[in-house]
Image (cartoon, helix red, strand yellow):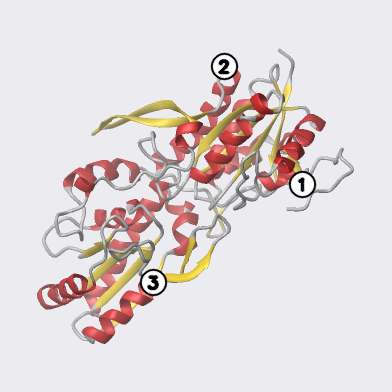
Amino acid sequence: MAIKNAFYAQSGGVTAVINASACGVIQTARKHPEQIGKVYAGRNGIIGALREELIDTSLESDAAIEALLHTPGGAFGSCRYKLKNLTENRREYERLIEVFQAHDIGYFFYNGGGDSQDTAFKVSQLAEKMGYPITCIGVPKTVDNDLPFTDCCPGFGSVAKYIATSTLEASLDIRSMSESSTKVFILEVMGRHAGWIAASGGLAGAGEGEPPHIILFPEVPFDREAFLKRVDFCVENYGYCVVVASEGAQYEDGRFVAEAGSKDAFGHTQLGGVAPALANMVKQALGHKYHWAVADYLQRAARHIASATDVEQAYKVGQAAVEMALAGKQALMPTIVREQASPYRWHIGEAPLSEVANQEKKMPIHYITDDGFGITDDCRAYLQPLIEGESFPPFEKGLPKVAKLQNQLVEKKLKAEFDI
């Protein structure tokens, strides 16, 4: 088999461990020089392929690539850019083929969530529809934990650990001040349509009256009166109320509580902030003193408190992607298959990109308590092993050490530029 180069790119919102997947891809590829030449990384995801902006990872030392294991963010740049169907925009696919041919690329690894797996699937169709042979494997990643066919998504375990920890720590703060100060604290977390991240806040406490006292899931229609009644009950009986709210909390009619009226790059409704909206309800209806916070990028960048389980899984799916490609497999995504919960055991499986693309895995109804405000024991059993284990990065002068890459672009071979 002729030696071919590989293209790897990161897509969508980055995570604390997406670079661990990159490490898995690059290190595994380096072990097979008889089949894979160089690994080129797309500068800012698939945009890097379209613009012929390819980073030559072969110029990075083994130590630099190893350091990706403990570096958050996207080392090569990510993007929110979704390829249209071949019939809608043939121009993009013809450009990809031109770039791949020019740089002798025969392997394609795309690291991202549902929209990204859709892109990976579309690229895999190049071989069939446009006569260009390329082996395409998706690499799962999303903090939302909403990809189907996999027990969990790399990136989620570390966010879950951060949110559970932050909920616990903030709750101690609020409780200590509640007699004469703040009574209600609202933490807004990510999760547009799936409440996995919000659910993870529930790991902070399990007993009667332990926070979080309210969790708001996208899967449960928001009832303003029931919410306010529960807040008032908690303040009256426990002295304070801690709320973990998914950004995607929505009313019965599908309107987001935090809807801002605009769209993002993928065409999804832009959300304006569920925490301040809820805080305003509490203020107007109940008059309790409150504070709110938005975990925002902090939750997905917190590599300093990453789950060791998550780091290992992120690396393994990157490794498995390369191994699948070298085995001649096509249009697949490595998955995580749970063998048992306690002690947690898992192995790598696989799922077809055609079935993964654009699908969302929401919280099962039996993971949510009957009142809609908490998690069940089944949910706790699912979540617990995903946050376990510590994988602290090395520190220098009190701060985490991160990878410092050259990210040198290869020389362009095509004359024409490509406008995004």
Residue 293's label in the rendered image is 3
- Mark earlier in primary sequence (1, 2): 1
Rendered residue at 22%/42% (across/down): 381
Q: Residues within 10 Å of mark 1 (few under 14, many from 20)?
A: many
Residue 353 picture location, percent across and down = 50, 32
Indicate the quadrant where residue 170 lies.
bottom left
Residue 7 picture location, percent across and down = 68, 34
Residue 327's label in the rendered image is 2
Q: Residue furthest top?
A: 1
Find disc 1 in the rendering and name its residue.
Answer: 51
Query: At numbered mark 3, what does the secondary structure look like: helix, strand or loop?
Result: strand
Is 176 on the left-hand or right-hand side of 150? Answer: left
Label 3 close to label 1 by CB (< 8 Å)? no
Residue 28, relative to residue 249: is it above or below?
Answer: above
Rendered residue at 76%/39% (across/down): 95
User: Observer-nearest residue: 272 or 251?
Assistant: 251
